[in-house]
Every structure is written in structure tokens, then in C-alpha cells.
Image: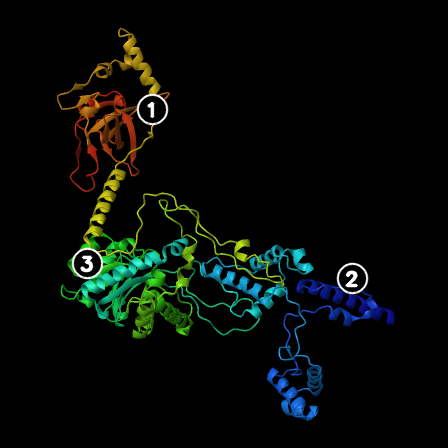
């Protein structure tokens, strides 16, 4: 039994030794591999000089510098006893006696360090760590912060390139240890691990001092020109709420891996809520867009008093140009602008906000509109700053309350419940305090260009590049800081900025695209540009709507046409096959018939809207189709046609209609056998799309028409 206990104890000791060895390596310490195993665990623990967390268990050795110097003075100058003096000042009498002896031996103790000193030997001094801290702050402010692994790697490169002694574990792992990172955080409490908010490059690029300065210039000019008072400065914006809420925090048991709560469905229905506020702290009742073509009167009754509920033909729930025009009418109803007292409306550059109809309405109804710079509303929009955040919080809380209500157990939340939740959350978020704070935080009212801190513009540093016409020199990187870690002042420390430079975009390339900035949307030049843009879009849309297929959907054997034309020109007396004898006279030259039909027409004889009979040759057979001319290309001698399909009828009747999936093709004029007389259609809705061709050419045609 004794040997079994001894063997088990030895196994336990070896396992503990291996664990402590790994721990020492991780912490930056190092175990002696040559120590005798019989020395026990005391020497093993003594090698672990660095502990991550150590809390004092006693107050031994804690005293102030002033008390110690006062005790030495009382003993030496006034001749007091050491023990009573130490008891009176709360000092250890042996420590006081030691400093009294040093003073008697003419040793200066005024600048001497008192108390216990830290045993742990730091790898970087205060100045070197401050260089790393400054780099981390700068990287975080330009939205290119470092992770823990990247910090450990950068620190190792920093000490390596500056020839600073490092532990063996750092060299083995090629990075700093975890313990050093924890101690670094303890020495610099301004840092913590945070989950960053995803920010697009468009926001980082657009939010810069130049764009924001243009907005403040326009705002100041409009305020001085129209003498806008705070009650006539409005801003509007949209936000979305869904039937799937973001759950609020709830009480749960510790140690449980997953804590869940009930939501109505996986993906909810979106409802757009449009809010409007002014700088006096007032607001206009919300304008809600539901994902329905038609809305219900009950929704407006449930929403806050004066609210408007609207749908759209697309039924998407998103803001459209038609919805925004009605939204402006809703704003005009409560703001009551006039020529004597116009109102200023601040908003973003969404496509639905800058339509020509919207600008004309604002021009006619004394609404002066100023747009924010693109992708800058997250910093300049008062609603986003202090209003919509509380609105989402109160809305989610109300949705959670509805889902946890026992009477709603097992029910799915729909858009019919959203008006009730908006009515509960809206008054709590749209308070005068929140609204006024939003205008103040953005520097709009009162006007304050310096309200936004300088470091908020730092993310644009990455894309802050010179124009192609300007100097092609790259912006200089931050100059490396210089420090020393030895008494030799000539030894300069290489800064982390040099080891790991900050991200920087390449120089701009020349582009003809015009940049969009903050602008007064009711000015005549802006209106003229929109009119030109709208005309160009309508022209492009009209061109795209016309069918044009570069590659025919039917296989056309052009080689047969070429060989036939060559044979005709080379041998005019060649005998013809009986099957082609009826078509030969029409192949030679255009012939106009009595009913206006033209056999083998030229491109000049064809117009848009004409109906033609087209021949398509394949390897084995030829097929014939009737098509409607959509476009004539005289230069290419080609025609774009939209083809009809023959309907099954009795013999002798030629009824045609356009198929459900339209067939469009580009054909050669040489393949057109005849320009047909215009067809007739039925007089009812059912027969209005069916065409009848009273054509002598078709009646005498010997081949079937598809």
C-alpha cells in the first residue's frame, strides 16, 4: 500500500511540475531544468517571479515618505527615542532605525525610495510603453485599431528592432506574452477590449473637415439671408422598425451557455418611420410608410395624434419619391411656411429627396432645403444623435413587453401591432430635451463649427489624398518619437509608427464623375442640373425599352444568301427549281401591289410600325414569320422586329398575336419577302390583341407561316 501511495504522489508531482513549467513559460519566467527534484516545490514556486494578479494581504511596510523623514528628524535633531517615535508616527521601529543610521553616516535619504519595491522586472520603461499607447490611440481613432494578437506582435517587433532584452518565451512565440498584455492594461487603464462598430469606407472618406465646412458655410449663409429663428429650422430623416425586436437584457442564471427570449419570427416586416423636429424642441407627428398598397384607417387612429400612415404600389416599406412628396405636404401642414416666414429643412441626399417634383413643390411652398454632405448624417443629423437611439430602445422594450404578455402567448407580431408600439415609444423619445441636445451636439443651433471634436475627422486620414492636378507627393507619416532606454542619450528608439505605418490609400486617379457635396436644393442651378439629368435618364430609358437584339434568336444562314446572290450575278440564264419559281420575280426588284403591299422592300421603304413577312433559313428547311418593325437601320441594311405567333384557327384564317414572352430579333432587309398591309384587330378587350391580315400576298403564299 505504501509504494502505491508513493507512486501516485510522484505522478501528481510530475503533473503539477509540468503545469507550472508551462505557466512560467507563458508568464515570461523560466524554470531551471537542472535543479534536483528533491528540493521540493519551494524552489519551483520561487522561480515564478511574475504573477498576473497579486493582492496585498497585510499593510506591512506601508508608510508615507513624509512620516519617515519626520521620524528621522525627530530622532536626530530632537533626541527622541526610536521606538516611541515609530509608534507615534505608525512606522516600523527597525525601518526607522535603519534610515536613522544612514542619515548619521551622512547618506542623503531625501530622494531615496521608501517601502517595498516591485520584484517584477519590466521589459519596457514608462516612456517606451507610452509610445505604444500613443500608437494604439491613433490607430483606434482612424478606425484601424489593433487586436490583442497584433499588439503582441507589434510589441515583439518593437523590442527586437530596438535591441531590448526579452524573455525566452517571446523569442520562441515571436510575440509578447499574454501576461505582459494584462499588465500593460493594468498600467494603462484607458484601454479595454471593445467590439468595434462596422463603418463603411464611404463614411470614413466623406466625413472630413472640407465637406463639413461647406455644410456650415451654406447653413450660415441661409440663416443670415432668411433670418431663420430656431422654431423655423427643421430636420427630417427616416428610420426603420420591424416586427422582430432586439431583445432587452433580462435576468438569467449564471453559467448557462445560451439564454434565449421569444421573438415573433426570423425576419420581420419593415415599417419606415419619418420624424421631423425643429431647433426649439418641437416635433411634427410621424409619417409612417407601411409595406402595403393600401393602409387601414385604424392605423392612423392608433398612431400619435396627427400622424399619417401611407403605403405604396411597390409595397416595400421603403421611402420613394411619391411617398416623400406626400411627406413634404405633411410637413407643410404643421410647419405653415410662407413667403414672409419660410422654413429651413435639413435632410440627406437620398434619391427620393432630390426628385424634380419635390424641388418644385418646395420652391412653390417656401421650403428652403439644405442637404447634408453624403455619408455624414451619422454625425450631423440631430435625429441620429439623440432621438432615434432612444426611440429604438423604447420600441424594443414595448415589443418585448408585448411578446411576454401572457395574453399574447403563441401569437406572431404583425404590422397591425406596430402602430401601437410606435404610439408608446414616440412620446418618450421625442422630448424637448433630446431634440435640443441633438441640435447642440451637431453645432447646428446654436451655430458652432467647433462643436465636433478634431479627432472625429481622423478616419478620413486614410483616404486624405491630394488631387491628381496637385502635388503628387504622399502625405508624410507621423514622425517617429524618440526616446532612450539606456543612459546613453545618443541611442534613439525607433517608433512603432515606423515599424507598422498607418494605412494610407493610393493617390487619386483622374475621373469625370462629379462629387456630391452639401448644397441648397432649392437653388435654380441645382434645379437645372436635375432637369438635365431627368431628361437624360428618360432618353436612356426610352432607348432601352425599344427591343434591340444584336444576335438573332433565329439561326440565319447568311452563306446561302451570299452564294445565291453570287450565282445570280454570275449566270443570269441559270435554270431555277420549280419550288422557287413563284418567288423569283419578287427577288429581283421591289414590286408594289395594288393593296399597298411591297414585295422585297428596301430599307428606305420600311418605317416603324410596319408589318413584314420574314424568311429564316436553316440547314434543312426555311421558316416564315410575321414581324412588326421596331427600328430601321438604313446604314446597316437591318431591321429590328417584334414577331407575332399564329393562333390555331380554321383553314383560310390568319390570326396572329404577340406571345407572352416577346421575341425580338435583328434581321437583314434581304430576308424580308413582303411589306404587308396593316392588320385589323377585334373590338373587344378579349380580341383587341388578336390581329387579322387581309393580305393577297399571304393568301397566295405557298408555304406555312409560323
**Quarter the N terminus occupies:** bottom right
- Measuring 80% from the left and 71% from the top, which residue is drawn there? 40
Disc 2 versus disc 1: nearer the observer: 2
**Mark 2 in CB contact with mark 3 (< 8 angstroms):** no
Could you say where residue 89 lies in the image, as x and y percent from the top left?
63, 90
Disc 2 versus disc 3: nearer the observer: 2
Could you say where residue 58 lies in the image, as x and y percent from the top left?
66, 82
Mark with earlier residue (3, 1): 3
Tag 1 secondary structure: loop
Q: Is residue 90 visible?
A: no
Could you say where residue 489 lies in the image, as x and y percent from the top left?
59, 61
Question: Please, is residue 265 above or below residue 110 in the view?
Answer: above
Give the CA separation, mark 3 to mark 1: 57 Å
Q: Which residue is mark 2?
A: 33
Find residue 556 and name its label.
1
Report which quarter residue 584 is drawn in.
top left
10 Å crowding of disc 3: few (<14), some (14-19), many (20+): some
Q: Which residue is mark 3?
A: 362
Q: Toward the viewer: 636 or 212? A: 212
Question: Please, is residue 34 above or below residue 57 in the view?
Answer: above
**Mark 3 in CB contact with mark 1 (< 8 angstroms):** no
- Measuring 71% from the left and 84% from the top, which residue is drawn there? 101
Q: Is residue 617 left or right of residue 167?
A: left
Tag 3 secondary structure: helix
Q: Toward the viewer: 323 or 697? A: 323
Amino acid at each position: 500500500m505504501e509504494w502505491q501511495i508513493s507512486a501516485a504522489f510522484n505522478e501528481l508531482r510530475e503533473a503539477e511540475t509540468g503545469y507550472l513549467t508551462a505557466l512560467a513559460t507563458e508568464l515570461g519566467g523560466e524554470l531551471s531544468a537542472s535543479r534536483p527534484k528533491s528540493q521540493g516545490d519551494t524552489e519551483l514556486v520561487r522561480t515564478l517571479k511574475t504573477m498576473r494578479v497579486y493582492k496585498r494581504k497585510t499593510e506591512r511596510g506601508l508608510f508615507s515618505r513624509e512620516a519617515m523623514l519626520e521620524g528621522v528628524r525627530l530622532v536626530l535633531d530632537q533626541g527622541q527615542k526610536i521606538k516611541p517615535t515609530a509608534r507615534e508616527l505608525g512606522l516600523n521601529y527597525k525601518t526607522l532605525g535603519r534610515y536613522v543610521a544612514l542619515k548619521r553616516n551622512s547618506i542623503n535619504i531625501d530622494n531615496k525610495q521608501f517601502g517595498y519595491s516591485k520584484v517584477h522586472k519590466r521589459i519596457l520603461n514608462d516612456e517606451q510603453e507610452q509610445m505604444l499607447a500613443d500608437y494604439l490611440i491613433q490607430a483606434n481613432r482612424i478606425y484601424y485599431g489593433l487586436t490583442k494578437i497584433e499588439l503582441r506582435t507589434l510589441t515583439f517587433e518593437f523590442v527586437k528592432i530596438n535591441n531590448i532584452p526579452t524573455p525566452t518565451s517571446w523569442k520562441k512565440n515571436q510575440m509578447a506574452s499574454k501576461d505582459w498584455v494584462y499588465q500593460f492594461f493594468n498600467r494603462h487603464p484607458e484601454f479595454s477590449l471593445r467590439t468595434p462598430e462596422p463603418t463603411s469606407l464611404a463614411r470614413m472618406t466623406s466625413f472630413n473637415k472640407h465637406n463639413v465646412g461647406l455644410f456650415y458655410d451654406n447653413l450660415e449663409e441661409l440663416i443670415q439671408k432668411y433670418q431663420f429663428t430656431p422654431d423655423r429650422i427643421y430636420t427630417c430623416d427616416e428610420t426603420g422598425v420591424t416586427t422582430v425586436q432586439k431583445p432587452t437584457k433580462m435576468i438569467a442564471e449564471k453559467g448557462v451557455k445560451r439564454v434565449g427570449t421569444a421573438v415573433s419570427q426570423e425576419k420581420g416586416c419593415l415599417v419606415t418611420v419619418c420624424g421631423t423636429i425643429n431647433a426649439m424642441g418641437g416635433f411634427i407627428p410621424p409619417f409612417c410608410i407601411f409595406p402595403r398598397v393600401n393602409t387601414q384607417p385604424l392605423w392612423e387612429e392608433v398612431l400619435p395624434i396627427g400622424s399619417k400612415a401611407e403605403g405604396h404600389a411597390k409595397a416595400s416599406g421603403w421611402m420613394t419619391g411619391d411617398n416623400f412628396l406626400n411627406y413634404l405636404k405633411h410637413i407643410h401642414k404643421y410647419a405653415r411656411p410662407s413667403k414672409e416666414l419660410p422654413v429651413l429643412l435639413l435632410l440627406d441626399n437620398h434619391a427620393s429627396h432630390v426628385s424634380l417634383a419635390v424641388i418644385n413643390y418646395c420652391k412653390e411652398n417656401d421650403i428652403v432645403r439644405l442637404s447634408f454632405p453624403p455619408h455624414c448624417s451619422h454625425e450631423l443629423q440631430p435625429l441620429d444623435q439623440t432621438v432615434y437611439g432612444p426611440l429604438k430602445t423604447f420600441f424594443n422594450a414595448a415589443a418585448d413587453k408585448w411578446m411576454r404578455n401572457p395574453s399574447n402567448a403563441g401569437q406572431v407580431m404583425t404590422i397591425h401591432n406596430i402602430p401601437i408600439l410606435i404610439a408608446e415609444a414616440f412620446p418618450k423619445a421625442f422630448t424637448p430635451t433630446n431634440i435640443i441636445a441633438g441640435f447642440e451636439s451637431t453645432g447646428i443651433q446654436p451655430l458652432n463649427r467647433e462643436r465636433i471634436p478634431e479627432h472625429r475627422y481622423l478616419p478620413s486620414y486614410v483616404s486624405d489624398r491630394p488631387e491628381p492636378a496637385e502635388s503628387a507627393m504622399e502625405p508624410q507619416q507621423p514622425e517617429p518619437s524618440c526616446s532612450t532606454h539606456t543612459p546613453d542619450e545618443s541611442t534613439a528608439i525607433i517608433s512603432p509608427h515606423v515599424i507598422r505605418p498607418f494605412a494610407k490609400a493610393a493617390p487619386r486617379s483622374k475621373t469625370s464623375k462629379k462629387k456630391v457635396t452639401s448644397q441648397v436644393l432649392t437653388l435654380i442651378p441645382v434645379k437645372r442640373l436635375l432637369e438635365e439629368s431627368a431628361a437624360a435618364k428618360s432618353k436612356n430609358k426610352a432607348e432601352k425599352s425599344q427591343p434591340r437584339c444584336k444576335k438573332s434568336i433565329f439561326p440565319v444562314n447568311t452563306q446561302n444568301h451570299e452564294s445565291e446572290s453570287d450565282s445570280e450575278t454570275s449566270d443570269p440564264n441559270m435554270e431555277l427549281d420549280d419550288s422557287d419559281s413563284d418567288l423569283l420575280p419578287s427577288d429581283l426588284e421591289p414590286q408594289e401591289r395594288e393593296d399597298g403591299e411591297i414585295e422585297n422592300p428596301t430599307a428606305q421603304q420600311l418605317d416603324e410600325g410596319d408589318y413584314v413577312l420574314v424568311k429564316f433559313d436553316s440547314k434543312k428547311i426555311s421558316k416564315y414569320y410575321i414581324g412588326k418593325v421596331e427600328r430601321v437601320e438604313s446604314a446597316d441594311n437591318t431591321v429590328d422586329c417584334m414577331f407575332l405567333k399564329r393562333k390555331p384557327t380554321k383553314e383560310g384564317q390568319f390570326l396572329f398575336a404577340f406571345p407572352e414572352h416577346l421575341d425580338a430579333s435583328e434581321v437583314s432587309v434581304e430576308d424580308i419577302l413582303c411589306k404587308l398591309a396593316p392588320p385589323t384587330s377585334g373590338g373587344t378587350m378579349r380580341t383587341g390583341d388578336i390581329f387579322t391580315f387581309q393580305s393577297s400576298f399571304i393568301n397566295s403564299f405557298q408555304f406555312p407561316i409560323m
